[in-house]
Image (cartoon, rainbow, N blue to C red):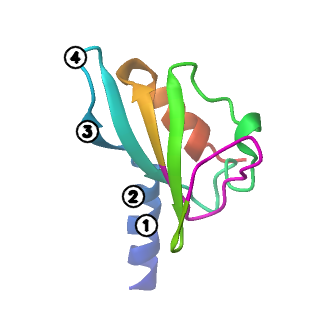
């Protein structure tokens, strides 16, 4: 049974969830959970190859709300919120879920 939970969790971790469409121009507020297996876990925000049309808005780490800045390092299980152009969503997903 534990194996099924791990599989479900790893599938969910890859999901970039659109929370809100912000404009007719195609910007979305999205959320993704950082997998402990992803290269992004343990990576400082400035070292991420984020799409140009993307802004990291906030991350939730446990009970803490953090506004990502240059000195912020993503940690496993962080819930990250971003505003991103729809055309750049797949690139953002790749950056945040790529395995080492």
Residue located beneath label 2 in the image = 12
Image disc number at residue 20: 3
Q: Are marks 2 and 1 in contact (CB under 8 Å)?
A: yes
Q: Callout 3 environment at 10 Å: few (<14), some (14 to 19), or many (20+)?
A: few
Q: Which picture quadrant has residue 18?
A: top left
Q: Position of residue 65 (x, y in %)?
A: 52, 62
Q: Would residue 77 be found to the left or right of residue 71 on screen?
A: left
Q: Which residues are magenta?
A: 66-80
Q: Position of residue 37 (x, y in %)?
A: 64, 59
Image disc number at residue 9: 1
Q: Are marks 3 and 4 in contact (CB under 8 Å)?
A: no
Residue occupying the point 33% across, 31% down: 28
The answer for how far apart the CA atoms under marks 3 and 2 are is 18 Å
Q: Are marks 3 and 1 in contact (CB under 8 Å)?
A: no
Q: Nearer the viewer, mark 3 or mark 1?
A: 3
Specify whether residue 39 is painted magenta: no
Image disc number at residue 24: 4
Q: Is residue 16 visible?
A: no
The answer for how far apart the CA atoms under marks 2 and 4 are is 28 Å
């Amino acid at each position: 049974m534990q194996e099924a939970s791990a599989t479900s969790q790893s599938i969910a971790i890859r999901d970039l969830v659109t929370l809100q469409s912000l404009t007719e121009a195609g910007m979305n507020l999205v959320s993704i959970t950082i997998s402990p297996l992803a290269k992004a876990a343990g990576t400082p925000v400035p070292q991420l190859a984020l799409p140009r049309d993307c802004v990291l808005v906030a991350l939730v780490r446990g009970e803490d709300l953090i506004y990502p800045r240059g000195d912020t390092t993503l940690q496993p299980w962080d819930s990250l919120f971003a505003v991103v152009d729809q055309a750049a969503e797949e690139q953002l997903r790749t950056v945040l879920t790529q395995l080492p």
